[in-house]
């Protein structure tokens, strides 16, 4: 299908992009890689009068690592996340997750900002950002603010971002320790039936910190505090992992769709959460 007609804007700085959003109000929407938005426009599930392309805004690009502090510009593509050697050293879970998104064509243009701003529960980066306790930097007509990834998602496609705000960057502290992103999908390039992001730190033989978050198992990404708490202080043996998996499963609310009934998704969730914890622990 062909999208409805729209006006195309290509600002070269953030202020101009914000001014265009202000000028056209509900009629305007920013476009990043377009790999979530354009399909919606083609299906006529979104009709947008004015598209504000963010690609010419240099301030939205780049990955900066300063000690443990990591800042990723909203317009960094999934491919750039995969290729960045310093990021792979500081937070290799980004690369592991990005490699499981779609296919090389989509990853070459799809951005981390579009992935997290979209609010699609099937997107992989939101749960990872919750796992890492990332903050999203938003800029709007009233200035800038930061919103925690764990507080950003309100319902499917509904986030804490106001329509006239632009996500400029994502910040988090490099987690250290072990990590894993496990994703069960129907075929290469598909969205997750169930996926889990886990980071674990080890002190001697015991787990000293753990974070568990999940993709596509509710209408929002789910960070399970109880699952992390179940691991801390333990040696991550089978019974400890079992308790953490049970705690994580208590926090999800999968629904039936073309990836299967809710019970199947719950089963798949149990498998990916267990695998992610075991792999993260083995790397810690
Ligand atoms: P766009 O499509 O341009 O924008 C998406 C939404 O976010 C729009 O509403 C837009 O207005 C808003 N937005 C974008 N950037 C900003 C910003 N800086 N500030 C404020 N709002 C903004 N994704 C996965 O996670 N996992 C998958 O397995 C997966 N499989 C896919 C398979 C196919 C065949 C396709 C086409 C896509 C797939 N995707 C998948 C989605 C892909 O990763 C998208 O590129 C990504 O979700 C959105 O990024 P984008 O840059 O394309 O954003």
Image (tube, rainbow, N blue to C red):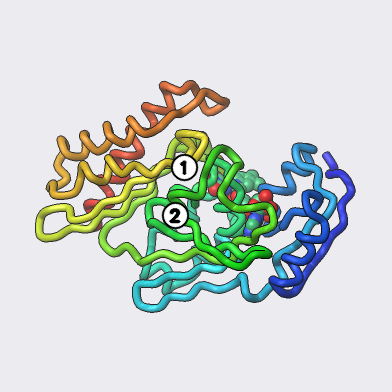
Q: Residue at x 40, y 78 (%)?
A: 66
Is any atom of residue 106 visible in this view? no
Q: Could you say which disc has been placed on residue 221 in the image?
A: 1
Residue 275, given in percent of the width and then of the height, sits at: 30, 41
**Figure quadrant of residue 174:** bottom left
Q: Quadrant of the N terminus?
A: top right
Residue 259, given in percent of the width and then of the height, sits at: 53, 28
Residue 279, given in percent of the width and then of the height, sits at: 27, 49
Q: Quadrant of the C terminus?
A: bottom left
Q: Could you say which disc has been placed on residue 129 in the image?
A: 2
Q: Residue furthest right?
A: 5
Q: Nearer the viewer, residue 282 or 252?
A: 252
Q: Could you say which disc has been placed on residue 100 in the image?
A: none
Q: Is residue 232 left or right of residue 245?
A: left
Q: Residue at x 38, y 57 (%)?
A: 132
Q: Are marks 2 and 1 in contact (CB under 8 Å)?
A: yes
Is any atom of residue 29 visible in this view? yes
Q: Is mark 1 within 8 Å of ligand 1?
A: no
Q: Residue furthest bottom?
A: 66
């Amino acid at each position: 299908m062909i999208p409805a007609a729209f006006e195309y804007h290509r600002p070269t700085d953030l202020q101009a992009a914000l001014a265009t959003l202000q000028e056209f109000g509900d009629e305007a929407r920013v476009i990043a890689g377009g790999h979530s938005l354009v399909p919606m426009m083609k299906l006529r599930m979104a009709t947008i009068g004015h598209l504000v392309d963010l690609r010419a805004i240099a301030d939205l690009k780049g990955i900066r690592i300063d000690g443990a502090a990591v800042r990723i510009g909203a317009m960094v593509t999934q491919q750039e996340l995969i290729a960045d050697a310093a990021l792979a050293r500081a937070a290799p879970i980004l690369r592991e997750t990005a490699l499981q998104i779609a296919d090389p064509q989509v990853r070459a243009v799809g951005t981390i900002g579009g992935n997290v701003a979209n609010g699609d529960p099937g997107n992989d980066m939101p749960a990872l950002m919750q796992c890492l306790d990332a903050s999203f930097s938003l800029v709007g007509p009233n200035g800038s603010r930061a919103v925690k990834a764990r507080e950003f998602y309100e319902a499917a496609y509904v986030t804490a971002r106001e329509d006239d705000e632009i996500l400029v960057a994502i910040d988090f502290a490099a987690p250290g320790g072990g990590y894993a992103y496990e994703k069960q999908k129907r075929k290469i390039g598909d969205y997750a039936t169930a996926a889990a992001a886990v980071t674990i730190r080890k002190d001697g033989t015991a787990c000293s910190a753990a974070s568990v978050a999940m993709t596509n198992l509710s209408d929002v990404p789910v960070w399970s505090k109880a699952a992390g708490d179940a691991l801390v202080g333990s040696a991550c043996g089978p019974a400890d992992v079992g308790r953490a998996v049970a705690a994580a499963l208590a926090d999800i609310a999968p629904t039936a769709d073309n990836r299967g009934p809710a019970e199947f998704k719950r089963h798949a969730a149990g498998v990916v959460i267990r695998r992610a914890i075991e792999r993260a622990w083995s790397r810690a």
